[in-house]
Image (spheres, rainbow, N blue to C red):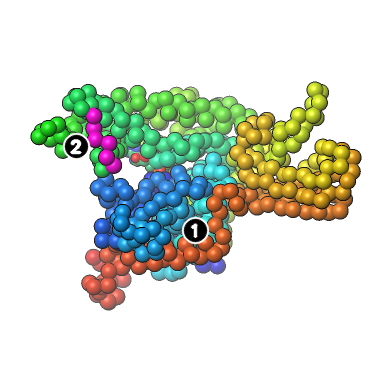
Amino acid sequence: MGKVVGIDLGTTNSLIATLEDGQPWVIPDEDGELLLPSYVGISDAGQLLVGKSAMRQYAAAPERTVKSIKRQMGTDYRVTLGGGADSPVGAASPKENREYRPQEISAIILKTLKQRAEEVLEEDITQAVITVPAYFTDAQRQATKEAGEIAGLDVLQILNEPTAAALVFEVNSEETETVMVYDLGGGTFDVSIVEITGNVTEVLASHGNNRLGGDDFDRQLERHLADQFAAHYDIELPSDTVTQARLLRAAEQAKIGLSENAFVTVREPFLASKGETALHLEMEIAREDFENLITPMLKETLAAIDRALSDADMEATDIDRVILVGGSTRIPLVQRLVENHLADTPVSSFAPDLCVGLGAAVQAGVLSGEAVDSILVDVTPHSLGIAAVMSTPMGPVPDMFSAIIPRNSVIPISRSQIYRTAYDQQDTVEIEVYQGENAIARENVPLGSFKIEGLPPKPAHALQIEVHFDFDLNGILTVTATEKGKGQQESLVVNDAETGRLSSRELSQSRDAISSLFDTLALPLFETENMETEEDIEDDNGNALE
Ligand code: AMP
């Protein structure tokens, strides 16, 4: 088996890591940068931009740049990127407009990371473990897997981010340690309770919000800056995308500054004008003001902690330590609130931006048979079941949610349940699959439905239908229903249709389109004009020279 890499495909930043001699390390780019900003764009000249170059372009040309695509994974969102408004839609050349699905944009990020690893490790990389928030739905996991396929990677496992983070922390003894992983990144929040015994990691409970993170703090601060600006000059800030993007970038920089300093000054010259006069934004922000802005959102994360504790049937005192993961945990208030909330539990963090990717590399090592014998046990983030008529003392109630796999079950898991027909002469049953926790089926997330038709005429309750759920390590659900008499059987791989899952033909079309984009990649690495020979760029020790 070749080398398997671990990839943290983040909302804000992504990275690729590998395992060597039992130790995970992050593979840097040619400038030594570990993180690849999760930005993709097309330059003015029609070149593909990925990472920092696309991030730099964002403020000036947001219409040609995509960020935070992770938030759209698993939806049928489309983004148009290309050379300009006049360009035809649907063309494969980046000089022309083309609509991209979220998994295609993610594939561009993955392919860039894959190439980075291939350069450094000097071998082809075809297999990967990719992390996702524990709270990601099946559709979001499927889309992540497809992104890997489009990028030319066989995704051996979709791994939950908090589980990956816990894999990095060495466990001191053979005694069981209960660890809470609090992960607050750019776009998502997750809290998981993980039990580690020796090399076995088991996720006991997981809870989160896949629409809460540092991006929201940036937006709050951006609004605050805009309000202050309007109050100061008595004029609204222009609402064009360039001004908004500049303000958002200034807000993020201010936020990061406030993690180290009690005050920062935001300066954005020539942000607007009043008559002939140019107006500049220059404003001091106190850490305390920023903290007040984000406290309500952070309180939501504390409520999620309580929910995870109660799901795991635990008290705060049962937690041995808390691990902080994700760039936003660098905000001092985050650490303080978590510490206060969990009283005397020690809170630690180690490379909060890197540890998910490092953990993915550990798991990749396990899968490729390298000498790290950790074993991973993961759980389902939601209950999975079907809509059914339930008998109650008041009589039958339709459309109730009958959970077949309860939330926080250890995966992989297969479970079956027997149902009976509800009416006399019933010749069809419809299996409607849902995920969620509400007792009313329709209040949960529908995952798909299918029918078994042509059932033999029988009185109510006489026919038995076995519904089998199979939930695999990647969080993908296969539902099979079998009529017990004649053995009629139908099945459904969840999210096949509704969630915009791609067919193999679409996948291969995407793969070709993304590959052709890479021919235009705006990286010095691929410029042929000044290309030196291999002897030129290596010194006697084989180290790469500038
Ligand atoms: P991640 O998704 O883990 O890469 O985290 C990215 C988020 O962390 C972004 O919203 C960043 O703005 C934020 N971030 C990174 N460094 C800091 C910092 N020093 N203080 C506050 N937020 C930060």
Label 2: which secondary element: strand
- The quarter of the rendered structure image containing the C terminus is bottom left
Give coordinates of residue 165: x percent, y percent: 49, 45
Residue of label 1: 148
Res. 253 in view: no
Q: Residues within 10 Å of mark 2 (few under 14, many from 20)?
A: some
The spot of residue 464 in percent (x, y) is 84, 44
Q: Nearer the viewer, residue 234 or 306?
A: 234
Q: Which residue does the image show at 77% across and 44% down from the upper left?
A: 429
Q: Is residue 213 left or right of residue 460?
A: left
Please indicate whether residue 156 sits to the left or right of residue 235 in the image.
right
Q: How many marks?
A: 2
Q: Residue at x 56, y 37 (%)?
A: 206
The dominant secondary structure in magenta is loop
Q: Label 2 belongs to which residue? A: 271
The one of 417 and 239 positioned closer to us in this rendering: 239
Q: Which residues are magenta?
A: 236-241
Task: Measuring from the top left, give residue 123's x and y in whole percent.
Answer: 43, 69
Q: CA distance from mark 1 to mark 2?
A: 40 Å
Q: Which circle's residue, 1 or 2, is located before the other in the chain?
A: 1
State if disc 2 and disc 1 touch (CB < 8 Å): no
x 26%, y 57%: residue:
44
Question: Three-letter amino acid code at disc 1?
Answer: Gly
Q: Nearer the viewer, mark 1 or mark 2?
A: 2
Identify the secondary structure beneath mark 1.
helix
